[in-house]
Amino acid sequence: MIILHSYCPTIRKNDQELPAILVNALKYYGYAVVDLPCPADSPRRYEEYLRAYWNTDDIIIVEQDIKVYGEEIKSLISCKKDWCAYQYKHRSDGAAMVTHGLGLTKISRAAQRVATPGKWLEGTYETLDARVLGWLSVNGWHPHIHGTVQHEHKTDE
Ligand SMILES: [Zn+2]
């Protein structure tokens, strides 16, 4: 299991880091935690990272603007299902709930084989969810929703 943490390096440091105590605990229990800096001026960087890690292991993706405390990641790790996610509001203004997002999701290797990177279209930070998870959906898969997490969207782009 690899935990991939994507973030924009131009956003304030305090807002982008996973809590150190959480990272230390994950590492203590043998999980790899990898930071994926995705600069705003390199919109394809996120996709490039995902392609690089795809099919290497089960992955959990944590995007910078999702508030995690640890229990959520523990819950994803211990679940046997192939595609798991926490839902969150798309924007802080109370817009629709995102259930097919990469924000906090686990994708097993079996599920990754369904949505192979060769089938993805080009995707930026904003569109990659639909590109990747859309492949699972069209193949009849549905995310196992573990609960709701807070989404702290910092910009209004
Ligand atoms: Zn699950």
Image (cartoon, helix red, strand yellow):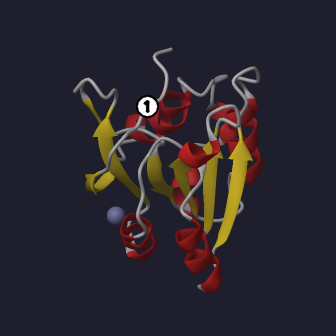
In the image, 120 versus 71, the foreground residue is: 71
Residue 147 x/y as whole percent: 25, 55
| Mark 1: amino acid | His
Q: In which quarter of the image is the N terminus?
A: bottom right
Q: Would you say 137 lies left or right of 23 here?
A: left
| Horizontal side of residue 67 vs 42, given as left or right | left
Nearer the observer, 68 or 109: 68
Point out the residue furthest to the top here: 157
Snapshot quadrant of residue 78: bottom left
The quarter of the picture showing ligand 1: bottom left
Point 63% across, 45% down: residue: 6
Disc 1 beta carbon < 8 A from ligand 1?
no
Q: Mark 1 — residue?
A: 153
Q: Badge 1, how many Cα within 10 Å: few under 14, some, many 20+?
A: some
Q: Can residue 149 be seen in this view?
A: yes
Side of 78 where 132 appears, left or right: right
In the picture shown, does residue 80 fall above or below 60? below
In the image, residue 26 lies at what x, y percent?
A: 58, 76
**Residue drawn 44% across and 46% down?**
66
Q: Is residue 12 above or below residue 57?
A: above
Q: Quadrant of residue 30?
A: bottom right
Q: Is mark 1 on a helix, strand or loop?
A: loop
Residue 24 is left or right of residue 133, and the answer is: right
